[in-house]
Amino acid sequence: MIRLFLSLLLTMGLAAAADNNASKKDANLSAAAQKHIQEQLKREQKYAKEQKFYQGKDYNLSEHKVTKDQLEAVPVIEPDYDFDITDVYRDDI
């Protein structure tokens, strides 16, 4: 009878200790979860700011429009087709 009582008492003590450890883990998990939530909120704010920029709804770019007259004034640059690849591999230059 005494053995049964002692084993029951020991079991209840171990269960109480396990509950105490579980509550500490929950507190640590809660702090880690709060930190993770704050990081995700910062990422979401950054994403929202970037999307606002990429959509360009708040920007007036009409002063930077180019007309056909302005395009005609731009000189045409002819490419140089006399490129020789051997110049790249020469050591004496």
Image (cartoon, rainbow, N blue to C red):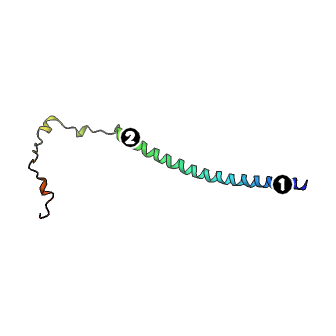
Up-down: is 73 above or below 36? above
The picture places residue 86, in percent across and down from the top left corner, at 12, 55
Q: Residue lying at the far top in this picture: please name it.
A: 68
Disc 1 marks a residue whose amino acid type is Ser
Instruction: Specify the farthest residue to the left.
Output: 82
- Is residue 27 left or right of 4 when viewed as pictured? left
On screen, 56 above or below 37?
Answer: above
Q: CA distance from mark 1 to mark 2?
A: 66 Å
SS label for mark 2? helix
Which residue is pictured at 38% across the width and 40% down the height? 52
Q: Amino acid at mark 2?
A: Lys
The residue singled out by tag 1 in the image is: 7
Where is residue 17? Give x, y as percent. Answer: 74, 55
Q: Nearer the viewer, residue 14 or 90?
A: 90
Mark whose residue sits in front, 1 or 2: 1
Q: Quadrant of the C terminus?
A: bottom left
Where does label 2 land, which residue?
Answer: 52
Q: Is residue 55 shown left or right of residue 1? A: left
Looking at the rendered structure, the secondary structure element under dot 1 is: helix
